[in-house]
Image (spheres, helix red, strand yellow):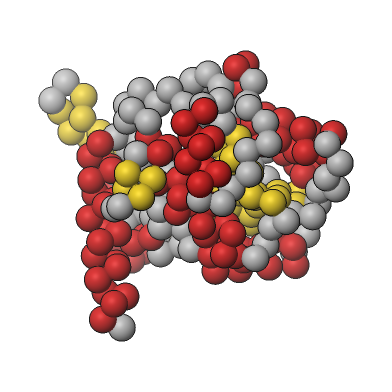
Amino acid sequence: MNICVIPARGGSKRIPKKNIKIFNGKPIIAYSIEAALASGCFGKVIVSTDDSEISEVAQEYGAQVPFIRPQELSNDYTATNPVIAHAIDWMQSNGDDINHVCCLYATAPFIQAYTISNAYKNFSKLSADFCFSVTSFPFPIQRAIKIKNNNISMFQPQHFSTRSQDLEEAFHDAGQFYWGVKKSFQIDNPLLSENVIPYVLPRHLVQDIDTLEDWKRAEIMYQVIKQINRKI
């Protein structure tokens, strides 16, 4: 059986109640839950949380919350893999036979069901340890600048005169999902290795949401995409 685990602890400081804050009409976690359910990839869609209010909202939108996450895995410094490994271990100790796992973040309102299923096809076909979402930087990272003491300099000054089209394209983690073999989560395999593959997303479907400014930008992007889809 494949399972989806959505980590969603309480106690967000920069955006209070971030995981269940209303995003264009419904709690932001609902988008991840609904996409996971619609993908048809999972025997169970589980939310790992330490918060009773998040638990109620998650179940309202169709996810299961079979356990409350331990406090030692719910602080500001807990990495993702131990949270997913805990969920795997708990489910297996309660009778579930698990094969592949998808960690899906709670604040990923642009996630699509077909993205989850297509990524799974690539991941399983190539027998990778992990497959995760990436997108390209909108500007060449080789021409990035830094500001120190009100002075500007380049990180890579040798590329001051290099044409943009001659520079290698760079990508970054899109922060939406991580498909993995259960053992890869359990033994904390590195996310960047030879047996990890990317799933490339267009930039307009990616927005990291860490601040209120990010949140507002994401809402505007979502509304624009929705309007465009209505016209197609």
Residue 155, how many percent across, how many down? 32, 37
Front residue of 16 and 100: 16
- The mark total stands at 0
Q: Image check: 108 left or right of 6?
A: left
Instruction: Tell me: residue 162, above or below residue 20.
Output: below
Instruction: Tell me: residue 21, above or below residue 31.
Output: above
Residue 70, how many percent across, how many down? 64, 20
Residue 47, how many percent across, how many down? 59, 40
Residue 52 appears anywhere in the view: yes
The single residue placed furthest to the bottom in the displayed view is 232
Front residue of 141 and 62: 62
Residue 85 appears anywhere in the view: no
Quarter of the figure that contains the N terminus? bottom right
Q: Residue at x 41, y 57 (%)?
A: 110
Q: Image check: 190 left or right of 10?
A: right
Q: Residue at x 15, y 28 (%)?
A: 151
Quarter of the figure that contains the C terminus? bottom left
Residue 38, how many percent across, how many down? 57, 64
The single residue placed furthest to the left in the displayed view is 150
Front residue of 78 and 200: 78
Q: Image check: 231 left or right of 85?
A: left
Q: Residue at x 16, y 21 (%)?
A: 149
Q: Residue at x 33, y 66 (%)?
A: 165
Q: Which of the 4 image quarters holds residue 156?
A: top left
